[in-house]
Image (tube, helix red, strand yellow):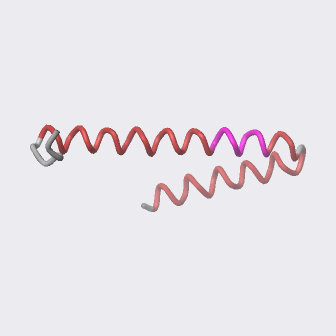
């Protein structure tokens, strides 16, 4: 949990730094970072569902 908070803080600091130079670039990078975060969360959820199904804890199909 601490590592996730540090990662978010680092990304936020980097976006602020880019925003000081170019606001449009910061908005684009923020959007890309958001998409990457959503993809990572979706992949993690998919992996957890797959592991649960292998253990027999998944829903019946």
Q: Quadrant of residue 31?
A: top right
Judging depth in this view, the residue of 18 and 26 nearest the camera is: 26
Q: Quadrant of residue 8?
A: bottom right
The majority secondary structure of the magenta stretch comes to helix
Q: Residue at point 71% right, 54% down?
A: 13
Using residue 17 as the reference point, say whether residue 1 is left or right of it: left
Residue found at the very far front of the displayed protein:
61
Indicate the position of residue 30 as horizontal and vertical percent values: 71, 45
Q: Residue at point 90% right, 45% down?
A: 21
Using residue 45 as the reference point, say whether residue 17 is left or right of it: right
Give the vertical position of 21 relative to 9 (above or below): above
Using residue 7 as the reference point, say whether residue 56 is left or right of it: left
Picture mark count: 0
Judging depth in this view, the residue of 39 and 5 nearest the camera is: 39
Using residue 11 as the reference point, say whether residue 3 is left or right of it: left
Q: Residue at point 40% right, 38% down?
A: 43
Judging depth in this view, the residue of 61 and 19 nearest the camera is: 61
Q: Residue at point 55% right, 57% down?
A: 6
Residue found at the very far right of the displayed protein:
21
Residue found at the very far left of the displayed protein:
56
Indicate the position of residue 40 as horizontal and vertical percent values: 47, 41
Residue 28 belongs to the span the image colors magenta: yes
Indicate the position of residue 38 as horizontal and vertical percent values: 52, 44
The quadrant of the image that shows the C terminus is top left
Residue 7 belongs to the span the image colors magenta: no
The quadrant of the image that shows the N terminus is bottom left
Magenta residues, start to end: 27-33
Indicate the position of residue 41 as horizontal and vertical percent values: 45, 45
């Amino acid at each position: 949990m601490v590592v996730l908070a540090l990662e978010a803080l680092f990304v936020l600091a980097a976006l602020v730094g880019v925003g000081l130079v170019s606001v449009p670039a910061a908005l684009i990078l923020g959007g890309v970072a958001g998409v990457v975060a959503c993809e990572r969360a979706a992949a993690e959820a998919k992996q957890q569902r797959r592991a649960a199904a292998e253990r027999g804890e998944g829903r019946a199909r």
